[in-house]
Structure formats: C-alpha cells, structure tokens
C-alpha cells in the first residue's frame, strides 16, 4: 500500500515537472545571440538543456538590465507625487478602469479620442468595433493604457496592477495570431509600431513583480520579435510617404535598441534607420524647396 502511495506521489511530481517544462518554448532561445557576454549564463543552461533554469536566468538578467524609458528611483516618488499630484491620480484612475476592462481614450495626444466608455463584461474582444467606429478598435490595440497599469504599480506597490498587465498581454497574444483576417484590425502596421514602445514602457514598470514569470517573459519577448519581423517585412509607397512609415519604423528602431539580445537586433537597427531616412527624404522639404515656396 505504501509503495503504491509513493508511486502515485512520484508520478504526480513527474507530471507536474513535465508540464512546467512544456510551458517553456525551446525555439525561443534560438532567437537569442548567445555570443553576447551578458547572456553567458543563460547560454550555459540552454546548452545543458535545462530550459527551466535558463528562463529564470534570463528573467533575472532583464530585471537587472538598465531601463530605456523608466529611469527614476524610489527616492523620486515623493517628489513626483507632490509635484504632479493630479497626473498621478489620473493615471491611477485610468489603471483602475483598465482593471475593470473599462476603456475610454482621452489622452492629450490620442489620435482618435473617445467620449463614451466601453466595458467588457466577460473577456476582452480585441477586434470589437463598438458604436460602429473602427478607430475605437485601433485605439484599443495601441495599448497605451497599460503604461497606466505600470504607473499605478509604481506609485501604489499593489500587485493587482502588474497582474492585470500580465493577464491582458497574455490574453492579447493568445487571441491575436498574425493572421490575414486581423491585418486590418488588431495587426494594422501602425498599431504594431505604436505597441512596440508602449509594451516596453509598461514592462519596465512591472518587471520586478512576482507576476512576471519566466514563462511570461518568453511569451512577451517572442511576440515583440514577431512584431519586429512583421514591421520589417514590408515598406510600401504609402508607408514611405506618410506618418505610418515613421511610426512603424520608430517601433522597429526601439526594439533594435531595447532588445539587443536578439540575433536580428543589429539588422533591425540598420534597416529602421534606412527606412526612416527614406521617409525624411520623401516627406520633409529641403531648405531650398522651402525657400522657393515663399519667394
């Protein structure tokens, strides 16, 4: 009887360990540049086929890595809260709305502001077009509101904000494959470019949260890699001659700098500069042409 009981316990442990291992995407590590010294430990664990520890090491590395956008310490929080009290309160209020899946887009620089909030009673439908307004769907998929979750986490220390970020990012990735049917909604190129920056900014706020697991980090980074490859796969005349191209390749340039651990990051950097240079040459008049207009 005891042996049977012991066998059951051992079997459960093995099944549990196996399920954890299955959550780790082994193909993801093929995207990383293990010639970089800072990834030496991660590379060693991958080489030993210990992906669980490798993913933990990678998360530890990203937590210690210097931020690109968020560069304030705990000693700055009191000053910010006293100097910018209204802005902090508004950000926390927005974060609470996002917690309740209630969305209203009223940022100062929003391209398409909305006046009527919309709340998802069940799970979020990222391709929904409420009120017959496609622009609402586009705003939803730019994800600027996740930055407010990060700010609320920074100023309150409440894990519910970080948890909401992780859950909503995971839900978006799982429900928005890069499919032709979604290219006109959740995968429009301009939204993809905007998301790159918003995702990185949000992540820097919450990366030390207990809710950011190694498995989430890999899913998150792999999706950003997909965004980069998607943006860099096309550069049509419309992108060359409109703000779309600038926004798309600004997103790619951001990823090339922030995610320098990827093998393709250097290529992204070079090609994003080339594409942005093309946009400048086509969209910005030279000094001589500007002068001639007013002659």
Image: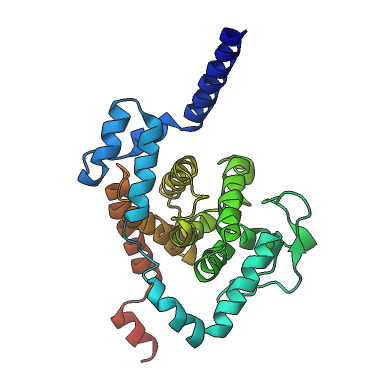
From the top left corner, tell me how far across and down residue 199 is, in percent: 49, 57
Q: Can the viewer see residue 108?
A: no
In what quadrant of the picture does the N terminus appear?
A: top right
From the top left corner, tell me how far across and down residue 159 is, in percent: 56, 58
Horizontal placement of 251 versus 192: left or right?
left
From the top left corner, tell me how far across and down residue 272 is, in percent: 34, 56
Q: Nearer the viewer, residue 182 or 140?
A: 140
Please count the marks in the image: 0
Q: Nearer the viewer, residue 167 or 78?
A: 78
From the top left corner, tell me how far across and down residue 126 is, in percent: 67, 51
Q: Can the viewer see residue 63?
A: yes
* Residue lying at the far bottom of the rendered structure: 295
Q: Nearer the viewer, residue 69 or 209?
A: 209
* Image point (67%, 58%), residue name: 137
Q: Quadrant of residue 162?
A: bottom right
* Image point (69%, 69%), residue name: 104
200 above or below 175?
Answer: below
201 above or below 169?
Answer: below
Q: Quadrant of residue 44?
A: top left
Q: Nearer the viewer, residue 202 or 133?
A: 202
Q: How is the image coloured?
A: rainbow
* Image point (60%, 49%), residue name: 167
196 above or below 21?
Answer: below
* Image point (29%, 48%), residue name: 267
In what quadrant of the picture does the C terminus appear?
A: bottom left
């Amino acid at each position: 009887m005891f042996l049977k009981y012991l066998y059951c316990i051992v079997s459960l442990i093995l099944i549990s360990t196996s399920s954890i291992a299955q959550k780790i995407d082994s193909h993801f590590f093929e995207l990383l540049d293990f010639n970089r010294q800072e990834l030496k430990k991660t590379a060693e664990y991958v080489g030993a086929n210990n992906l669980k520890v490798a993913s933990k090491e990678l998360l530890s590395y990203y937590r210690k890595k210097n931020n690109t956008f968020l560069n304030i310490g705990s000693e700055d929080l009191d000053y910010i809260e006293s100097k910018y009290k209204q802005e902090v309160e508004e950000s926390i209020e927005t974060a609470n709305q996002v917690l309740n899946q209630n969305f209203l887009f009223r940022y100062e620089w929003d391209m398409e502001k909305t006046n009527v909030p919309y709340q998802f009673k069940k799970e979020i439908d990222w391709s929904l077009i409420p009120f017959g307004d496609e622009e609402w769907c586009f705003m939803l998929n730019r994800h600027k509101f996740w930055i407010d979750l990060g700010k609320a986490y920074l100023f309150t220390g409440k894990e519910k904000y970080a948890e909401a970020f992780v859950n909503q990012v995971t839900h978006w990735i799982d429900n928005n494959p890069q499919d032709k049917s979604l290219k006109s909604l959740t995968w429009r190129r301009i939204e993809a470019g905007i998301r790159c920056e918003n995702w990185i900014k949000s992540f820097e706020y919450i990366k030390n949260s207990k809710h950011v697991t190694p498995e989430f980090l890999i899913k998150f980074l792999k999706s950003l890699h997909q965004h980069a490859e998607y943006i860099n796969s096309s550069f049509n005349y419309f992108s060359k001659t409109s703000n779309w191209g600038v926004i798309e390749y600004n997103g790619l340039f951001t990823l090339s700098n922030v995610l320098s651990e990827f093998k393709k990051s250097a290529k992204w950097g070079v090609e994003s500069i080339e594409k942005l240079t093309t946009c400048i040459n086509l969209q910005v008049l030279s000094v001589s042409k500007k002068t001639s207009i007013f002659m």
